[in-house]
Image (tube, helix red, strand yellow):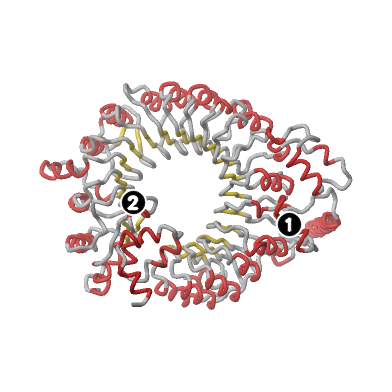
Amino acid sequence: MSRMGFMQMLPLEVLSHIMNYLDFASRREAALVCHTWYEASIDPVFMKTTKYTFDVSLLEDEDNFSIKRILHGCLCKSPNLHITGLDENFNAKLFLKLQDSGMAILGPHVVHLSLKNSNILERTLAAILCHCENIESLELTGCNTLFMSGEVFKCSERTTSMKACLKNIKALNLSSIRYLNDAILTRLASLCPSLESITMNSNTLSSSSIANSRSNLLTFSNIHHTISLQAAGITHIDFSHTSILSSALSSLSTIRNLQLRSVVLQYCRELTDEGVINLVRCQKTVTLLDLTGSSEIGNGTMSAVCTHLNNLQTLKLRKCQKVTSASVSHLYQLENLVELDLSECFDISMNSLQNGIRGMRKLENLQLKCCNLTKFSEYFFGSLQPFHNNKHGFTSSNITHFTEVGTSISKPVNEVLFTNALCYLDVGSSQYVDDLALQAINVHLTNLEVLKLSWCGSITNRGILGLEIIEKTHFQQKKQEHLESYDAQISEFLSSGKYSNSHGQAGLMGIPGSEFVTDKIILDDVKLANCMEKRGLARLKHLKQLSLSNCKKLSEAGVLLLFQYKCGPFKHLESLDLGMLHHAVIDDTLKAISCAGRLRSLCLAFCGKVTDAGIQYLSKHLRSLDTLNLSNCDSISNRSLRALSVNCVWLKELDISMCGRISVKTVNELSSMLPSLLRLHTRYTGGASLDKTL
């Protein structure tokens, strides 16, 4: 008996145990061997964190028996099911017919069901739910047809069956429903006695007294009444992108027996400090507070949060620009904080942020994108002033002394603010995150799994390779002279009176990276290995996601040496963003990247030196890719698309926008060659002409 035949005869339990040692990509490939292996690969043990997406639009043609035969044997054991393309007029009946005849898409395994943007009626919803006896979460986002009549959940006969289906529902998502009103919400809530979470994102809510007399509107007073009826069970509310007022939020927070744990209020433009302050004073059990984009939220909210929410674990204040240093310095009171997002809060100083983060020993996720990170390394990793007095700057011996001994600096190493718990760090879009800061990150934060350095224009090859940092190099002098000459040319051009609408051809604007001056690296392998091991980016061996997009000072030599080190230093890397590195990414770079066999998402946007040869090599060695961005890669042609269609069969999203050498005919063929492709971006493909694209 052959080895393959023996493997096929093993019990499913044994096969599933063997597959437990494989990563996701390898298990996905093994599932294609035979039906037995496929069943073993979808064991419920593997499916807990997966999402199964089923596109019902494939069933639009009732005469396509081949598709029906394939789907008839389809199995789904994932607890998270997302059904797309469901339409009452085209495929809903066929979908239910195949389900009743044995297609195992719906079933008792489904716990979280999403029918987002489905065009269905109440009878179809009831027929779907009757198959999902263990469902606990239901998403009806954008299901406008279901609620259009206003009579949904009103029929007494159907209400009885719906109540049996919805009795275990804990999470209900009613976002972006145009026809949702008070009567429908009341009826639906009465069918869900176990409700714990309610999401009403992007709904039109009214608080006026006139609106209370109109039955076709959704009002705050009715929402208040609905939540008060089930206050003992509800722990999560989401009113993002709504016009909720501070008075309404204050009223909700005082409901008797209500103990919220999660509050999401993203982009609530009319919400002020008053409402959130009243919320946190009354709801001290909150562990997640998301105020992203709520522009009127400021220091008053921050002070109240730091005072009253001692158990808070997640705080998101992205784009809350009224939050300043005065309140951030008190964040140390939130000792249980695990995730903190202060991105795009511009009025926060490093000193206040340092004081605020000092007591957070459980912090795992820190996002500081677009923040003022002046002297980032000095505030968070120790004072480095003594080394700036050395005419040779921050040398390798100095760094070793700083990281291992810490006796010649004002802040000992054991006082470094970041702990080993930190695994997610986003410091993108900051000119103050330089080589020194990056090397400090590499030395101290070796447990990082996600590092985002996008648009950090001060990072060079020396930072990622761990090379010694000196005060003024010949490279910097040469670049300064080049920039001065470039500025002089622009000034001369502007003063010549020749400026016009065609200035792009006149020489004022060049291609991205046209002002780039390379920094030549000449090192022997021993010295490079020593630097990489001590301070290089290769120390972050647990990285799963890395973003270096538009770090414009990186050259092809630096990026190539990084990814070639020890045949690829990042063995767990799943997502890599090298977009806009026009000079740094070449075909040899792609060959080095191919060593990261687990890579599933790759961005190469604006990498103009990448050719068909590089994409062909990449596609053969990274067959598990499911997201690839090749926009504005002008050197690739139809050959690259054909290579991707043959080798990258799992590709779900592809961006080839503005690729002038790719023909529209090949793009049209690509969709049929890659059946798994869900999103294909082709803006102005075939040349910068809208006519050609269309």
Residue 636 location (% of width, % of height): 58, 73
Residue 341 location (% of width, % of height): 55, 38
The secondary structure type at the circle numbered 2 is strand
Q: Of label 1 and label 2, which has the lower sequence position?
A: 2
Q: Which residue is mark 2?
A: 80
Tell me: residue 69, above or below residue 358: below
User: Which residue is at the front of the view, 27 or 342?
Assistant: 27
Q: Is residue 204 left or right of residue 358?
A: left
Q: Is residue 492 visible?
A: no
- Look at label 2 and name its amino acid: Asn
Q: Please, which residue is most extreme toward the right here?
A: 391
Q: Is residue 223 left or right of residue 456?
A: left
Q: Is residue 19 left or right of residue 301?
A: left
Who's the residue at 43% across and 40% down the image?
241
Q: Which residue is mark 1?
A: 461
Tell me: residue 31, above or below residue 262: below
Q: Is residue 683 visible?
A: yes
The quadrant holding residue 180 is top left
- Look at label 1 and name its amino acid: Asn
